[in-house]
Image (spheres, helix red, strand yellow):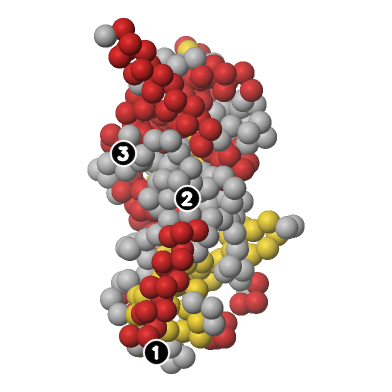
């Protein structure tokens, strides 16, 4: 995987060339003082040096609402609706790249989701190295997601007047095909990149009191903690945390039928474990009617359950949930509180012994 160099002034021309080749371009753009992933019509709209976005780019793999198939009750016919077009997702931060890695694992586990697979196959990922923390809530160093060595098709690192470029796949080579304003890096370019990365490591600090490997155990020991009820007392059950999370993928499925009751569609839409009716089952039984139990489920799923199922912690440390929460429930405070509880229990046990 050789190093290549692209002048910053060439980025616009590269995007324009991709648009001429009929690629859909999506990337971060400014919106009312914040940043969102959206279609890029003009390369000047791309804010590739953005801090972070309000929501994660998962919407381009798992739309908030999609038609799975249509059906005709008269003929008993069903037609799958699988929509995917060649799309280049520009400027993806490394934490979001790790989130996509997890989604790939989940969606291809066992029975692969054909809708996800079609969009994933059509998606080209251009990631960018984060050289400093993107928000006050991020803790990507703790989650080991503040850099990336795989999954990307093209990876960029800002070196001042140019980008260090690494192509990580055949799809990446396809994006670079025919583009001439890029060249093989020299030893001096590699040395310069090493210096940039060396400074980067110093810009990030650990925010959690537990290590990534300790987190599942800390959460497992906190199953009966009273802290969950404290969170439940202030939680508004708005679901904003799951809405912006890059690794949440829970959904609801609804059949929408026309007035003749003969034609309709099956729709999949995002759902949230923080909403009251999420865990309601037949007989109107609700396994998580209490807000504290819903909070416990969310944090357990991120820090313990997904690790047990897939070998990866389900939180990438982006901090979006903490930024979005109107009552300041954050991963950093929650994980650290539970870590302290665990230490206190251990100390008390040693005293008794």
Marks 1/3: CA–CA distance: 40 Å
Element on which disc 1 rests = strand
Judge the density around disc 1: few (<14), some (14-19), many (≥20) Cα neighbours within 10 Å: few
Q: Which of 177 and 241 is in front in this view?
A: 241
Which quarter shows the N terminus? Answer: bottom left
Image x and y of residue 230, in percent: 57, 18
Q: Name the residue under label 3.
A: 213
Q: Mark 1 points at which residue?
A: 183
Image x and y of residue 70, in percent: 47, 47
* Residue 171 sits above or below residue 260 on the image: below
Element on which disc 2 rests = loop
* Residue 69 sits above or below residue 13 on the image: above
* Residue 90 sits above or below residue 145 on the image: below
Does the residue at mark 2 contact the one at mark 3 (Cβ under 8 Å)?
no
Count of numbered circles on the image = 3
Quarter of image, res 121:
bottom left
Marks 1/2: CA–CA distance: 34 Å
Marks 2/3: CA–CA distance: 17 Å
Image x and y of residue 61, in percent: 45, 54
Judge the density around disc 2: few (<14), some (14-19), many (≥20) Cα neighbours within 10 Å: few
Q: Residue at x 73, y 58 (%)?
A: 33
Element on which disc 3 rests = loop
**Residue 111 visible from this viewpoint:** no
Q: Name the residue under label 2.
A: 205
């Amino acid at each position: 995987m050789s190093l290549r160099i692209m002048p910053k002034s060439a980025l616009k021309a590269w995007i324009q060339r991709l648009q001429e080749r009929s690629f859909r371009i999506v990337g971060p753009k400014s919106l009312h003082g914040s940043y969102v992933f959206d279609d890029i019509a003009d390369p000047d709209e791309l804010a590739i040096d953005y801090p972070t976005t309000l929501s994660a780019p998962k919407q381009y793999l798992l739309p908030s609402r999609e038609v799975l198939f249509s059906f005709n009750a008269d003929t008993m016919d069903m037609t799958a609706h699988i929509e995917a077009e060649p799309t280049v997702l520009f400027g993806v931060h490394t934490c979001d790249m790790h989130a996509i890695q997890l989604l790939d694992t989940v969606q291809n586990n066992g029975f692969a989701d054909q809708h996800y697979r079609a969009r994933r196959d059509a998606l080209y990922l251009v990631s960018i190295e984060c050289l400093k923390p993107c928000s006050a809530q991020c803790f990507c160093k703790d989650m080991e997601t503040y850099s990336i060595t795989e999954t990307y098709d093209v990876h960029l690192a800002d070196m001042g007047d140019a980008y260090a470029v690494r192509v990580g796949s055949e799809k990446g080579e396809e994006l670079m095909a025919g583009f001439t304003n890029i060249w093989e890096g020299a030893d001096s370019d590699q040395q310069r990149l090493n210096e940039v990365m060396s400074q980067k490591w110093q810009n990030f600090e650990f925010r959690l009191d537990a290590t990534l490997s300790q987190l599942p155990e800390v959460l497992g020991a906190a199953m009966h903690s009273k802290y969950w009820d404290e969170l439940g007392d202030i939680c508004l059950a708005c679901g904003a945390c799951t809405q912006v999370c890059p690794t949440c993928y829970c959904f609801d499925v609804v059949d929408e039928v026309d007035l003749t009751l003969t034609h309709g569609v099956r729709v999949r839409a995002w759902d949230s474990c923080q909403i009251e009716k999420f865990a309601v089952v037949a007989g109107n039984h609700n396994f998580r009617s209490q807000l504290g139990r819903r909070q416990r489920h969310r944090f357990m799923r991120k820090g313990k359950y997904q690790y047990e199922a897939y070998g990866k912690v389900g939180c990438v440390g982006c901090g979006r949930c903490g930024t979005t929460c109107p009552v300041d429930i954050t991963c950093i405070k929650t994980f650290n509180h539970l870590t302290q509880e665990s230490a206190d229990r251990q100390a008390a046990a040693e005293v008794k012994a």
